[in-house]
Image (cartoon, rainbow, N blue to C red):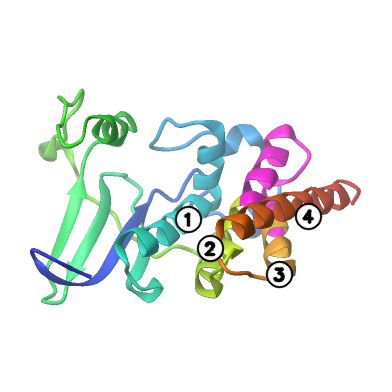
């Protein structure tokens, strides 16, 4: 991937870490819907807020970046940034890094998407004098395994990303409805991914993979609720 600044060596996507950053898997076993919906930085809908708590949203962003920018999977990294000020970074082959910074407000990217190439006035601006520091940390992919599942789906390719998305939407819906524990989201998605055979990413195959993944996810959720 090249740009006016030269060859890109890697893309770094920042993640807030969600409301459960720093917690162990044992502690995550008992978290509630209400806790999952208390995002530390962003005000978003319920489904995407849960995705942020599992880090599934960032895994899907890795897949999106891979396809949108034609960047190999091994050149896309995720880094936890609790303040949600740095939204993404691009590192060039000469070691310099270009970062996109802004207030954590979803209205900003939505407005830009609707008015591109024009930019509307911001309701809030960064006050660098009040920024005590910006933290960066490696994500805990062992505790938050959804990030690893997304990389696996991207690596195997074909219809697997679509299957993972369908399984995740079904599992998150069950969690929000109270019929699946928080860690069950990852468990359901892992089972679906393990039992899905990837096919060529043609439209009919993608739609079929989505339907099959949702059906299988519901079956797994049903057995989970009986435990």
Give how far apart the Cα atoms at labels 3 and 1 are. 18 Å
Along the line of sight, which residue is nearer the eye, 132 or 10? 10
The circle drawn on residue 216 is 4
| Looking at the image, residue 89 lies above or below residue 199 | above
Circle on res. 150 = 2
Up the image or down, 186 lies above or below 197; here it is: above
> Image check: 148 left or right of 64?
right
In the image, which residues are magenta? 166-187
Residue at (15, 76) in percent of width and height: 93
Vertical placement of 204 versus 173: above or below? below
Residue 31 spot, x, y in % from top left: 66, 43
- Residue 111 drawn above or below residue 64: above
Residue that label 3 marks: 194
- Say if mark 3 contacts mark 1, CB within 8 Å: no
**How far apart are labels 4 and 3 at the CA level?**
11 Å
Please tell me the numbered disc located at residue 60.
1
Q: Quadrant of residue 204?
A: bottom right
**Closer to the N terminus: mark 2 or mark 3?**
2
Residue nearest the observer in this picture, 12 or 29: 12
Q: Earlier in the sequence, mark 3 or mark 1?
A: 1
Whichever of labels 2 and 4 marks the residue nearer the N terminus, that label is 2
Q: In terms of secondary structure, where does tag 2 sit?
A: helix
Q: Does label 4 or label 3 sit earlier along the sequence?
A: 3
Q: Which mark is residue 163?
A: none
Task: Measure how far apart labels 2 and 1 are at the Cα level.
Answer: 6 Å
Q: What is the secondary structure assignment of the residue under circle 3?
A: helix
């Amino acid at each position: 991937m090249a740009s006016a600044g030269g060859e890109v060596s890697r893309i770094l996507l920042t993640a807030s870490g969600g409301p459960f950053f720093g917690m162990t898997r044992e502690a995550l076993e008992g978290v509630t819907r209400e806790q999952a919906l208390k995002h530390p930085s962003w005000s978003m809908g319920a489904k995407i807020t849960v995705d942020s708590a599992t880090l599934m949203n960032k895994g899907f962003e890795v897949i999106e970046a891979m396809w949108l920018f034609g960047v190999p999977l091994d050149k896309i990294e995720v880094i936890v940034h609790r303040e949600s000020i740095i939204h993404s970074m691009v590192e060039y082959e000469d070691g310099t890094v270009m970062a996109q910074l802004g207030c954590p407000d979803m209205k900003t990217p939505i407005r830009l998407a609707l008015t591109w190439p024009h930019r509307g006035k911001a309701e809030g601006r960064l006050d660098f004098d009040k920024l005590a520091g910006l933290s960066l940390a490696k994500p805990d992919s062992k505790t938050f395994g959804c990030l690893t599942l997304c990389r696996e789906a991207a690596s195997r390719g074909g219809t697997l990303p679509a299957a993972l998305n369908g399984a995740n939407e079904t599992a998150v819906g069950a969690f929000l409805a109270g019929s699946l524990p928080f860690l069950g989201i990852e468990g359901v998605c892992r089972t679906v991914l393990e039992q899905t055979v990837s096919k060529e990413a043609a439209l009919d195959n993608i739609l079929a993979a989505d339907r099959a993944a949702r059906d299988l996810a519901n079956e797994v959720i049903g057995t989970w609720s009986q435990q």
